[in-house]
Structure formats: C-alpha cells, structure tokens
Image: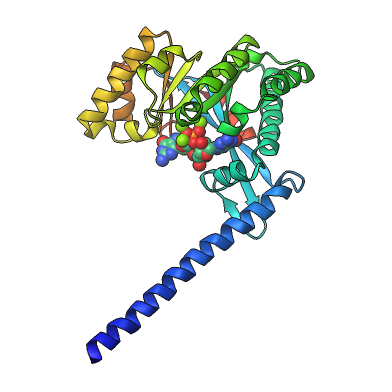
Amino acid sequence: VQISRRIAVQEKHLWHWYMQGEDEQHMRQLAILQHLKDAVAEQQLNLVLQPKVDCVSGRAVGAEALLRWHHPVLGHVRPDEFIPLAEQSGEIGRLTRWVIVEAFSVLNKAENAGIDMKLSVNLSTVDLLSDTLPKLLSDYVDQFSANPSSLMLEITESAVMQDPENAIERLQQLKQRGFMVSIDDYGTGESSLAQLKRLPVDELKIDRSFVQHLPNDERDQIIVRSTIQLARELGLKTVAEGVEDDASWQLLQSMACAELQGYYFSKPLPIEEFFAWYQSH
Ligand code: C2E
Ligand code: MG
Ligand code: MG
Ligand code: MG
C-alpha cells in the first residue's frame, strides 16, 4: 500500500511537472505571437548574412540573408521558433516585406562598394502561394533600381510540395520577372523526380542533415554525390549547406558541388562585418 501510494504521489508530481512544461511552452508561444506584431515597428529585427563560397576556389560569391529577432523581454528568439508561428498567424507577410526591403538595401550597399554578389532570401510557403508576391518583388526592383537576377529566392522543398501545382505556377511567374529561385533543404521534403524535373528553378540546396556528417557517413556520401549529379544533368547548380570542416569541403569538391555554405567558412555575420569578410575572401 505504501509503495503504491508513493508511486501515485510521484505520478501526480510528474503529471504536474509535465503540465507546467506544456503551459510554459504555450505561454511562450502566445507571447511570441503577441510581440511579433510590433517587431518591425519597434525595430527589433535585423538581418545577418552568411557567405556562400565557390567550391573550387573557396572565394566568396554571395550570401544568404537570415532573419534575427531580439525582443527586450523574450531575448533572442530563433527563426525556427518564430517563423512557423508567423506563418500560422498571418504575420509572415509583414516580416517577409521587411526582409526583402533590407535585402535590396544590402544589394545597393554592395553595388556602391563595388561588390558584385548574389543575395539569397528565404520565403515561406505562405509567401510563395500569395498572389501578390511577384508584383511586390518587381515593385521593389523598380524602387531600388535593382537587378532582379541578383536576388535568389529560397523556397523549401516542403513548401513546394504542399501545393505543387500552384507553387510551380508562382515560380514560373517569378522566373519570368527575372528572379533566381533555389530549392532549400533539398532531400527532406519528399519531392518526386517527376516534380523536380518540372520545377523552374536555378539552384538546389542540399540539406544540412546530409552534409554535416559527410566524412564519416558513406550513405550520406552516396546521396549527396548522386544528388549533385542529378542536379547537374537537369541544369541546376548545387549548393551544400552546413559545411563544418575541411574534410567535407574536400569531398564536396571531388563531387563537383558548385557552391558551399557553412560554419567552416563563416557563421552568419552582421552586415558591415560581412562586407569586410567578403572583400578579404
Ligand atoms: P535555412 O534557410 O536552411 O538556413 C540555414 C540555417 O542553417 C541557418 O539557421 C544557418 O545559421 C544554419 N547554418 C548555416 N551553416 C551551418 C553550419 O555549418 N552548421 C550548422 N549547425 N548550422 C548552420 P538559422 O539562421 O537559425 O535559420 C533557421 C531557418 O529559419 C532557416 O533555415 C530558414 O528556414 C528560416 N529562416 C531564417 N530567416 C528567415 C527569413 O527571413 N524568412 C523565412 N521565411 N525563413 C527564415
Ligand atoms: Mg535558406
Ligand atoms: Mg536550408
Ligand atoms: Mg533549413
């Protein structure tokens, strides 16, 4: 009796503890949703730029813009945490517009500094399927007198697969307006080869999960090598993300990957630091 009573008490504690954890997470999500609305107006967002390098020479060729949010009370909130919530709440459009304006202003600064680079920005599923996106982007191109082909739009494979027919149509419109398109996190989103063939894109970004353990994982090597070959034969450029060591770089070079991105070259950097890095690489 005593033992079973003790177990019951323990279970109650566990349950209580579990519920508290659930509540805390829920509260945090609510707080994120509430504060996200003001993040743009309160100037709590900024972009960091992670260099992309040429696989053969290791020289800088461009960057990916990654969103950062610092809230005075919540602190740094990771994009993996707030982007999905922003998508669900409809707040994503505002964030994406902010990112795009910042991205064009980075491209302007680069041009003024005599740097010829491509800049990638991430779009969410909601952005991709919104019918105002192509015109919005073209309006910014006019406003900034920018070259649309300097902007690479990264769309995750799973975003495309959510509604392939619409996604393909939208991607075609973006390509017609001169933007470059990249399939992000490739290999995690269950697209079929038939669909890949139909996608009007310029670049495939092999997901970090296949790249991170490349030197020690023969299966990853097989997957990455054949993906690069497939992409090449379809006329797409391949980028490997998550390159963390020299051994991975050597392997990717032997596989004739086009471009690399990862901590081995640089973490995402604040804009001014990025320009300094770029010019010395
Ligand atoms: P992503 O687009 O696949 O971006 C790559 C992520 O991998 C970034 O994380 C980057 O910091 C990280 N990374 C790069 N190199 C390495 C490496 O060598 N090792 C490891 N462990 N990680 C590396 P981050 O900045 O936390 O962004 C996470 C995700 O959030 C992004 O994945 C993207 O899906 C989303 N995201 C970020 N910014 C935006 C944005 O402006 N709009 C949208 N819609 N999504 C964004
Ligand atoms: Mg990306
Ligand atoms: Mg990615
Ligand atoms: Mg990712």
The quadrant where residue 10 appears: bottom left
Residue at left offset 73%, top offset 45%: 43
Give x and y (percent) for residue 138. 72, 17
Image position of 67 (left or right of 38): left
Return the residue nearer the eye: 90 or 31: 90
The answer to whether residue 125 is above or below residue 259 is: below
Closest to the observer: 152 or 214? Answer: 152
> From the image, which quarter does the N terminus lie in?
bottom left
Residue at 52 percent across and 61 percent down: it is 25
Is residue 268 visible from the viewing direction of this image? no
Q: Is residue 155 above or below residue 116?
A: below
Task: Residue 17: give x, y in percent of width and height.
Answer: 43, 73
**157 or 279, which is in the foreground?**
157
How is the structure coloured here? rainbow
The part of the image, by quadrant, that contains residue 48 is top right
Q: Is residue 79 left or right of residue 36?
A: left
Q: How far across and how far down the image is residue 84, in percent?
A: 55, 43
Q: Which residue is painted at 47% across and 17% down in the image?
A: 203
Q: Residue lying at the far right in this picture: please name it.
A: 143
On screen, residue 117 versus residue 13, left or right, reads right
Viewer-closest of 200 and 205: 200
| Number of marks in picture | 0
- Give the answer, above or below, for where 92 lies relative to 232: below
Say whether residue 56 is left or right of residue 247. Answer: right
Residue 215 seen by the camera: yes
Identity of the residue furthest to the left in this view:
218
* Residue drawn 64% across the image and 52% down it: 33
> Could you say where residue 179 lies in the image, as x and y percent from the top left?
61, 15
